[in-house]
Amino acid sequence: MKLAQRAALGYMGGATRTLMSTRQVKAWHSKSTKIEERRVSFVENRPLLQPCPSWPCLLPERRLMGGVLGGKKKEYSERRVLGYSMNQMFDVVSEVEHYHKFVPYCKKSQVTSRRPGFLKADLVVGFPPVVESYTSSVTLARPHLVRAVCTEGKLFNHLLTIWKFSPGIHGQPDTCTLDFSVSFEFRSMIHSQMAHVFFSDAVRKNVNSFLVEAQRRYGKESILARRPQIVETS
């Protein structure tokens, strides 16, 4: 009897253990299925890769005049003592018809009308690869002033060049003081951008070209060349 009871109890215990194992397996499968479902749901609902809001914009940036390069208007003025007389420098500057022979970027210079104290000239200037023309009206007051302003043409909105000559070193009439200024504004943004690149260098070359021409005509300066005093540049 005891053997039969033990056998029965053993059978029941084995069945119970087997039943518990089956339940555990089912529970494990249920948990595993839920985990997989969550993983699939996460993958399906996950958004596509997007840039972080803090990432910098990598698009190319265009910077034209008015941005990095500033406005279109340019100004420059200087003062220097020269080893030539006021009359000598006045003649060099006032004879506009010769500009194309020695002034940088000037391709053509033709006086179209002249009267005492005034002349009008057509000029062609080249800033490679651009070549443009304009008309200049020039006021003359010997030996003190040459004032040129652009009155016609598509190149400039504004162009004003002033040469003022005054006595130089006291007791040395073959010297004079030059006050030079130029102010201009191109119509084209492209021309303005080009001017920004070489403006100061071009202006200095322009002034120096008149001194080279004076030396060609009258010989070396009567005094040692002096550095210009830059009054204003922008």
Image (cartoon, rainbow, N blue to C red):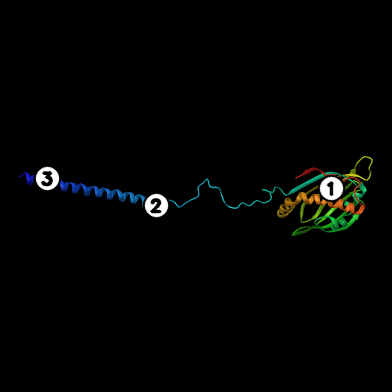
Q: Position of residue 63 (x, y in %)?
A: 65, 51
Picture disc at residue 43: 2
Residue at numbered disc 1: 162
Asked whether the viewer can see residue 156, the reply is yes
Residue at the outermost top position: 170
Residue 119 x/y as whole percent:
88, 54
Q: Does dot 1 land on a helix, a strand or a loop?
A: strand
Q: CA distance from mark 3 to mark 2?
A: 51 Å
Tell me, yes or no, whether the two marked residues, 3 and 2, touch with CB atoms within 8 Å: no
Label 3–label 1 contact, CB within 8 A: no
Q: Earlier in the sequence, mark 2 or mark 1?
A: 2
Q: Is residue 149 left or right of residue 46?
A: right
Between 175 and 193, which is closer to the camera in this rendering? 175
Q: Which tag is nearer the camera, tag 3 or tag 1?
A: 3
Tell which circle, 3 or 2, labels the residue nearer the N-terminal end: 3
Residue 82: x and y in percent read: 88, 46
- Pointer 3 residue: 9
Q: Nearer the viewer, mark 3 or mark 2?
A: 3
Task: Classify mark 1: residues with Cα within 10 Å, few (<14), some (14-19) or many (20+).
Answer: some
Res 159 visible:
no
As shown in the figure, which amino acid type bears the numbered disc 2? Val
Q: Secondary structure at mark 2?
A: helix
Quadrant for the N terminus, please.
top left
> On the picture, is 208 further left or further right than 5?
right
